[in-house]
Image (tube, rainbow, N blue to C red):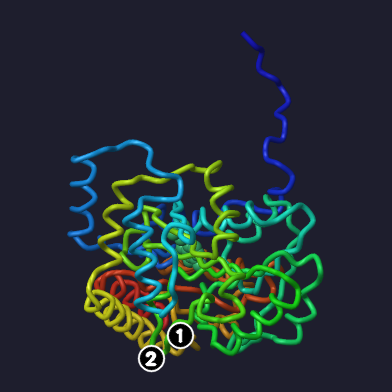
Amino acid sequence: MSQESTTAQPAVRQALHPFGTSIFTEMTFLSNQVGAVNLSQGFPDFEGPEEIRRAAAEAIMRGPNQYCPSMGIASLREAVALKMKRFYGVDVDADREVTVTAGASEAIGAALLGLVDPGDEVILLEPCYDLYPPMAAMAGAKTVYVPLKRPGFGLPRDALAEAFTDRTAAIIINNPLNPTGKVFTRDELEHIGNLCEEYNAVAIGDEVYEHLVYDGRKHVTLLQVPSLRERSIVISSTAKTFSLTGWKVGYAVACPNLSEAVRMSHQFITFCTPSALQEAMASAIGMADSYYETLLLEYGSRRQRLCRALEDMGFETYRPEGTYYASIDISPLGFEDDLAFCRCLTTEVGVAAIPASFFWKDRRAGKDLVRFCFCKKDETLDSAIERLAKWRP
Ligand SMILES: Cc1ncc(COP(=O)(O)O)c(C=O)c1O
């Protein structure tokens, strides 16, 4: 029997030392501890459509429940290819250009691990989703941060051009953008495309909120931009569109050459993901236009409910162009920063939110912003609004 060492060895690899516990875990934990209304982490408090859940249950009972092809089952890859044609007019080869992954998260990881060599540079537009920096670090990349221009979070064209070098392997574009809800314009994406072409870099699009774009705006996928059709990996997920975040059914769409990079690493990460859930999502993606229209209408009404209430309370509110997050400016409220505000809001007011500064490398750049998610039942939103209104009558 081996003796236990008395001095604990540091177990976590060096590349991960700069990163702590995710702020989503921390805020949800605190929220549960004090019984707050949780508008922090972005998951619905209602179930996804019953027919999708039934389809998964039937697939499990029917079987087989064994490993499926690493790239994903044919019906889901075909559904994704049809979706790309139906919503964006892009022709996609289901066999060679679609890879099913464990959520968008694994697809982002697989793309970076499959593409990047140690020392390569990866450009991140700030604010950026918390998964990108540690994932890029684990891939051995050097991260280069380019902050979007406030107040509207527009693309800083000159700064971005300066950030590209011969070592740039990839840039990640989260569109629509979590946390601020910015939707990139076609013109901005073309500018990114030109730079990727000039520097032979790959654009990785994280488009998980593609169906939540408001006020008549249209989501433009990277694959619609001619200069990016053969040099981008577009990643999406069924989590947000079908309100089934726990299933982690995601996928990456890219030309065969780039799909090869994703598939190569994916086979050594998860190899494959649950086939019953894939089967159910294959039929979900093919649902009638009315499903997608209703989804958008419902989210439009939740957005209006929360934003109008926040505005009525006198908060300067950022109404998102896309996603299911709304932010407020807390700078006039006298708190030390957004984290102090969110801790106080959770424990004193009973509403949990996310301090948006965690989406920047230099947290000072976002310490005036706090993000609320509105993927919640009306009564949950109303209960949060009521608590906030009592605090700020
Ligand atoms: C921008 C963004 N990308 C990826 C994900 C994770 O997606 P999935 O659950 O499919 O891994 C999220 C979830 O909140 C997200 O906001």
Q: Quadrant of the N terminus?
A: top right
Q: Tell me if residue 11 comes above or below residue 310 in the rendering.
A: above
In this view of the protein, which residue sits in the foreground, 104 or 271? 271
Residue for point 43% across, 54% down: 100
Q: Determine the residue located farthest toward the top in the rendered image.
A: 1
Distance from the alpha carbon under mark 2 to that under mark 1: 7 Å
Q: Residues within 10 Å of mark 1 (few under 14, many from 20)?
A: many
The picture quadrant where one finds residue 141 is bottom right
Mark number, residue 321:
1
Q: Tell me if residue 107 comes above or below residue 319 in the rendering.
A: above
Return the x and y of residue 59 as percentages of the image width and height.
Answer: 22, 46
Q: Is residue 90 left or right of residue 23?
A: left
In this view of the protein, which residue sits in the foreground, 71 or 204? 71
Q: Tell me if residue 195 comes above or below residue 275 in the rendering.
A: below
Residue for point 31% across, 50% down: 277
Q: Amino acid at mark 2?
A: Asp
| Residue placed under numbered mark 2 in the picture | 215
Asked if labels 1 and 2 touch by Cβ distance under 8 angstroms, the answer is yes
Q: Residues within 10 Å of mark 2 (few under 14, many from 20)?
A: few
Mark number, residue 240:
none
Q: Could you say whether the residue bearing mark 2 is in a helix, strand or loop? A: loop
Residue for point 38% across, 42% down: 68
Q: Could you say whether the residue bearing mark 1 is in a helix, strand or loop? A: loop
In this view of the protein, which residue sits in the foreground, 134 or 282? 282
Return the x and y of residue 140 as percentages of the image width and height.
Answer: 73, 52
Q: Is residue 305 left or right of residue 123?
A: left
